[in-house]
Image (cartoon, grey):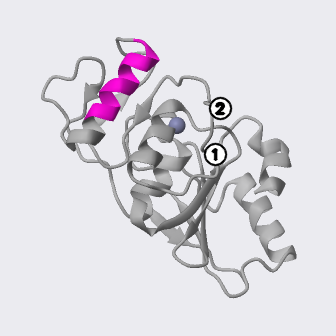
């Protein structure tokens, strides 16, 4: 993780690594990541040089919504891909935005970025499991939106007419991840 955070490719994108199950790793970035991506190739080379793939499987998580790549926050790509209950630990190169942090907490994910520091507000954010989006293009302040998200997590229901968020017509995709094979 420290290695990824120190690489030039992570300066403009939030990268996230999670321990999936007991020992496997799942990696992604905002918008999802494919194995063709230059950053992915650099990460694979580092994994191989450190033999981090020995005795564990390595997965890449993909996007989960067509709302736009900016709405596919890296942490939420991993939650949507494998389910919150299968994540042992998650950590990002950048601080979580308020919505990701709240969602990780609501689903009781062990979050390496938990703490007082919040990332800046984002244009788009989509919930990994529910039909709701937030972001700076929608009405309300970030805190008003966050309060609405907390209420949605408390009740487990997205209101028919959210005050600040935007209800989506389709469910987010689950299971969008694949195993990396190393030769
Ligand atoms: Zn976020």
Task: Give above or below for 19 relative to 38.
Answer: below
Q: Can residue 131 be seen in the rendering of this structure? A: no
Q: Magenta region, mostly helix, strand or loop?
A: helix
For the N terminus, the quadrant is bottom right
Task: Give above or below for 166 relative to 75.
Answer: above
Report which quarter residue 169 is drawn in. Answer: top left
Point out the stretch of residues depicted in magenta.
Answer: 141-151
Identify the secondary structure beneath mark 1: loop
Report which quarter residue 88 is drawn in. Answer: bottom right
The image shows residue 4 at horizontal and vertical percentages of: 78, 53
Question: For this view, does 115 lie left or right of residue 178?
Answer: right
The crowding category of the residue bearing disc 1, from other C-alpha atoms within 10 Å (few below 14, some 14 to 19, many at least 20), is some
* Residue depicted at 70% across the width and 80% down the height: 182
Q: State the CA–CA distance, disc 2 to disc 1.
A: 8 Å
Q: Which mark is residue 113?
A: 1
Residue 144 is covered by the magenta coloring: yes
CB contact under 8 Å: marks 2 and 1? yes
Residue 172 is covered by the magenta coloring: no
For the C terminus, the quadrant is bottom right
Question: For this view, does 38 lie left or right of residue 59?
Answer: right
Task: Give above or below for 130 relative to 79.
Answer: above
User: Which residue, as the protein is rendered here, is positioned at the far left?
Assistant: 160
């Amino acid at each position: 993780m420290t290695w990824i955070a120190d690489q030039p490719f992570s300066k403009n994108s939030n990268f996230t690594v999670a321990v999936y199950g007991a020992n496997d790793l799942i990696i992604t970035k905002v918008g999802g990541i494919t194995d063709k991506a230059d950053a992915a190739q650099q990460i694979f080379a580092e994994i191989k040089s450190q033999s981090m793939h020995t005795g564990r499987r390595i997965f890449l998580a993909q996007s989960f919504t067509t709302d736009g790549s900016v709405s596919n926050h890296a942490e939420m790509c991993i939650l949507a891909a494998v389910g919150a209950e299968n994540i042992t630990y998650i950590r990002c190169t950048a601080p979580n935005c308020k919505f990701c942090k709240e969602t990780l907490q609501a689903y009781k994910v062990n979050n390496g970025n938990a703490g007082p520091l919040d990332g800046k507000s984002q244009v788009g954010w989509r919930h990994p499991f529910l039909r709701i989006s937030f972001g700076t293009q929608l009405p309300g302040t970030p805190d008003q939106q966050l309060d609405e998200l907390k209420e949605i997590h408390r009740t487990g229901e997205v209101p028919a007419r959210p005050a600040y968020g935007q209800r989506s017509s389709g469910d987010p995709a689950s299971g969008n991840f694949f195993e990396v094979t190393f030769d």
